[in-house]
Amino acid sequence: MEHTGPKSIEAFSTAQQYIPGGVNSPARAFGAVGGNPPVISHGRGAHLFDLDGNEYIDYVCSWGPLVFGHAHPRVVQAVQEACLLGTSFGAPTQAETALARQIVQMVPSVEMVRMVNSGTEATMSAVRVARGFTGRDKILKFEGCWHGHGDSFLIKAGSSALTLGAPDSPGIPQAIAALSITVPYNDLSAVQEALRQNPGQIAAIIVEPVAGNMGTVPPRAGFLQQLRQLADQDGCVLIFDEVITGFRLSAGGAQEYFGVTPDMTCLGKIVGGGLPVGAYGGKRQIMEQVSPLGKKISQAGTLSGNPLAMKAGLVQLQMLSEPGVYARLEQLSQNLEAGMAENLKKLGLRYTLNRVGSMLCMFFTETQVVDYATACTADTARFRRFFWELLKRGVYMAPSQFECLFPSAVHSDGDVERTLRAHYEALKAIH
Ligand SMILES: *Cc1c(COP(=O)(O)O)cnc(C)c1O
């Protein structure tokens, strides 16, 4: 059943000899769905091609960054022009200022911003800065949110509100786990309780304003507003991890979409136009404590602000600032959602569909999905069969139930139509 061609199988087996699991990021190994991943040769627009010549409509889009699809001519041109002038200097360039200014103009909470090379670096650095700024050590985060692979984030909740967090991976000291408190997403009373139990000790609340790493889970009405209030009362820093939602839900990200302004914001994915970029920023008063300024909170990077990456990110953000882009993303995503709902109805199925803008997920459960526990009611074995039935029909979605579909602004109406036909047939095939 696992549909992959002989060239992909051979290439992936070679990769496994030299790279752990054959991949540089574990989800690519298809562990959640089994089978051999297609090995990619190239992408064009909304379409992806593997070594065996199979073509797919791509809803992964590099896990979010490619909001204008693969190899967009304007992004390609920006990178080509930049690399002719030199690939890295480790000295100031105007390209850095141009992207920083663009981010400050687009994202409400960001008055100053520091570039890094990944979303992980952005969240790790933001937490360091929040700790340095407040002089407090603990952080509060939410179950099912993903903030990259920093030690402080790979911590699962203790068995009760009173037990310490536990490392989620070998290699993370219990002493670090003890500083991360994890509560259920959308659960304000758990947040209040955690703040009460740790008075004056929590440096930051970090949250995905729309959770995009347990499928798609929207914040309950008032959830983000209440977090804002609770953080103010407690004196901790409210960090929105907008690595997915930034520049996706609106030009100003989820904070503009929901009208709630955090103290700090983490960016990644879209901000780099498909090159490795992350960024963190926020209130001037906080960012002015980052080295070489103020309290000199340490954070550095040899390749940070890389000119190729800055140019790719800038052109993509400029394209997002042009009229009609978010309306197009919304319309496409709405059509996908409506079509999927219709397919489910035709087949007499009642699976949960969650969508916020161009973040979309069909959960194989009839339970309303509002947090990690409810997301886990999904039938992952059925997802796995569905995934392969879809892939066989030329639709490439993330190889896990707990990921979003990311339609791009260059998916055509024809792509959506083909996707919905495949969606219907794949569902039919597994029921
Ligand atoms: C992807 C992601 C990260 C990590 O970004 P990397 O570039 O993979 O390090 C952090 N936070 C969220 C919400 C993400 O989706």
Image (cartoon, grey):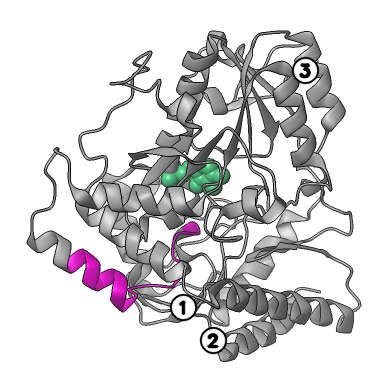
Frontmost of labels 1 and 3 is: 3
Q: Which residue is mark 1?
A: 46
Give how far apart the Cα atoms at labels 2 and 3 are.
46 Å
Which of these two is toward me, 77 or 16?
77
Relative to 180, say whether 9 is above or below: below
Tell me, yes or no, whether the highlighted magenta stretch contains residue 64: yes
Which of these two is toward me, 415 or 363?
415
Label total for image: 3
Question: Of label 2 and label 1, which has the lower sequence position?
Answer: 1
Relative to 74, say whether 10 is above or below: above
Relative to 144, say whether 236 is above or below: above
Tell me, yes or no, whether the highlighted magenta stretch contains residue 45: no
Measured from the top left, where is residue 420 in percent x and y?
A: 68, 83
Measured from the top left, where is residue 392 in percent x and y?
A: 56, 79
Measured from the top left, where is residue 369 in percent x and y?
A: 82, 51
Question: Of label 1 and label 3, which has the lower sequence position?
Answer: 1
Residue at left offset 44%, top offset 47%: 104
Q: Which residue is mark 3?
A: 194
Asked if marks 2 and 1 touch (Cβ < 8 Å), the reply is yes
Q: Which residue is mark 2?
A: 412
Relative to 346, say whether 205 is above or below: above
Residue at left offset 36%, top offset 55%: 272
Residue extent of the magenta highlight: 63-80
